[in-house]
């Protein structure tokens, strides 16, 4: 992999995390499950990718999310949220994994223009550095709405009516990796011979064995010999916790992923694990731990199953392209293009293309709505609802 090399300070940061990971491997007898490696690489306090202060988003970071490269994304989500708030008779918006705060700023401005400001916009953020970045952005661009924004350390206990937004959150949940070997499941772990991280095979955790058996039952046939993939065994507990915090409302989950039958296609023999470093995607999770993102595509069938088990309804599921169009992207784009010059017009059109085209984010990203006590239609699923594919 050809990538820019980190500066000395970043390398020193990564080496601190490497030392902790090597200690954990030694204490475990020579190997740890990949899930444990991924969790610490991403969430180790002060050192993990999501818990340190390194810049992750935008041109100077490792990747660009939809809210970062186009305000049309946030404006369109705001229109869907406004529809939900109206049906709920008011309420608040809770954003999980708010990144730089750009989605909040764009959506709040649109909600204000629509006359549907939420009672509060609450942001659940684990990174102190990102909290500061989010507050600075809001203070600069929407200072008059800053008192309407609240940061959370944990799930709220006082949100009777709410719209939840989670853009690219589920892909960062640590996953267990496995390989089919001699008709059985082996868990993929991480060892460190000669202080170099390497893959190794381990006996599977019971929850992994159960999960893969369930996948094969749904598929109606065993996975092929040598098949390697991943499964998020902590997803049910994760959604159970969120469900307990949702009294009445809708959760929108936006992420790259597939339904189960596409996720575990026979030809997808290496799984979906992907890492991001300086806008380069690759498949080596051992490259400078703490300095790169590690993600896996989302199994939306598993999300639906976990939501149902947690007492939620699956209110809709489709690709990002038709969801945004149904939710009002065209109207947002027309308003942005009104009076624009030729170059600006082309720029807006390119943003629409990137957000909606099947060859770009329009099909790779999916949107699922889970809810409780919500009976009104959701415009984002008016053009296409693929719940039948789950």
Image: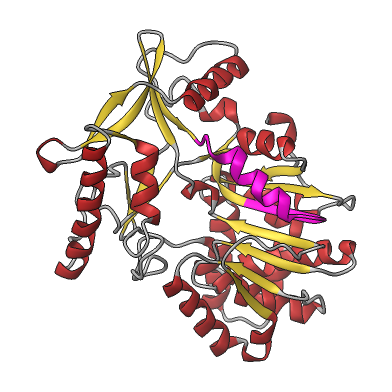
Point out the stretch of residues depicted in magenta.
Answer: 232-253
In percent of width and height, residue 389 lies at: 69, 30
In the depicted structure, whether residue 171 falls above or below residue 32? below
- Quarter of the view holding residue 385: top right
- Is residue 235 rendered magenta in the image? yes
| Residue pictured at 54% horizontal, 25% vertical | 211
Which residue is more in the foreground, 210 or 81? 210
In percent of width and height, residue 266 lies at: 46, 19
In percent of width and height, residue 184 lies at: 41, 12
Taking the view exactly as shown, the residue that stands out farthest to the left is 194
- Is residue 280 rendered magenta in the image? no
Task: Kindly tell me whether residue 72 is visible in this rendering.
Answer: no
Which residue is more in the foreground, 326 or 269? 269
- Taking 99 as reference, is 9 left or right? left
| Residue pictured at 72% horizontal, 35% vertical | 309
Q: Name the quarter where the C terminus is drawn.
A: top right
In the depicted structure, whether residue 349 falls above or below residue 215? below
């Amino acid at each position: 992999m050809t990538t820019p090399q980190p500066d000395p300070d970043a390398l020193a940061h990564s080496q601190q995390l490497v030392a902790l990971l090597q200690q954990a491997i030694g204490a475990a007898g020579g190997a740890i499950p990949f899930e444990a490696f991924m969790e610490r690489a991403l969430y180790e306090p002060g050192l993990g990718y999501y818990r340190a202060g390194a810049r992750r988003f935008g041109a100077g970071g490792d990747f660009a999310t939809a809210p970062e490269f186009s305000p049309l994304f946030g404006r369109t989500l705001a229109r869907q949220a406004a529809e939900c708030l109206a049906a709920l008779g008011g309420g608040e918006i809770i954003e999980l994994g708010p990144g730089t705060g750009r989605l909040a700023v764009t959506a709040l401005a649109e909600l204000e223009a629509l006359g549907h400001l939420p009672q509060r916009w609450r942001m659940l953020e684990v990174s102190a550095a990102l909290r500061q970045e989010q507050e600075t952005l809001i203070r600069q661009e929407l200072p008059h709405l800053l008192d309407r924004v609240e940061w959370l350390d944990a799930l709220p206990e006082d949100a009777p009516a709410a719209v939840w937004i989670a853009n690219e959150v589920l892909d960062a949940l640590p996953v267990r990796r496995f390989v089919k070997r001699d008709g059985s499941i082996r868990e993929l772990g991480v060892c460190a011979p000669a202080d170099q991280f390497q893959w190794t095979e381990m006996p599977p955790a019971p929850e992994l064995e159960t999960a893969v058996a369930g996948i094969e039952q749904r598929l109606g046939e065993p996975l092929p010999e040598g098949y390697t993939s991943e499964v998020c065994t902590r997803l049910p507990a994760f959604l159970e916790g969120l469900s307990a915090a949702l009294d009445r409302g809708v959760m929108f989950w936006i992420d790259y992923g597939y339904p189960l039958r596409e996720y575990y296609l026979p030809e997808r023999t290496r799984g979906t694990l992907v890492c991001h470093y300086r806008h380069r995607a690759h498949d080596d999770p051992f490259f400078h731990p703490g300095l790169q993102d590690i993600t896996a595509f989302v199994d939306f069938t598993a999300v639906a199953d976990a939501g149902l088990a947690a007492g939620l309804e699956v209110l809709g599921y489709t690709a990002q392209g038709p969801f945004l169009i149904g939710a009002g992207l065209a109207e947002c784009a027309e308003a942005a293009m009104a009076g624009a010059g030729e170059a600006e017009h082309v720029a807006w059109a390119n943003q629409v293309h990137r957000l909606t085209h099947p060859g770009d984010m329009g099909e790779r990203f999916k949107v699922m709505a889970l809810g409780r006590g919500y009976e009104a239609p959701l415009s984002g699923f008016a053009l296409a609802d693929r719940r039948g594919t789950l």
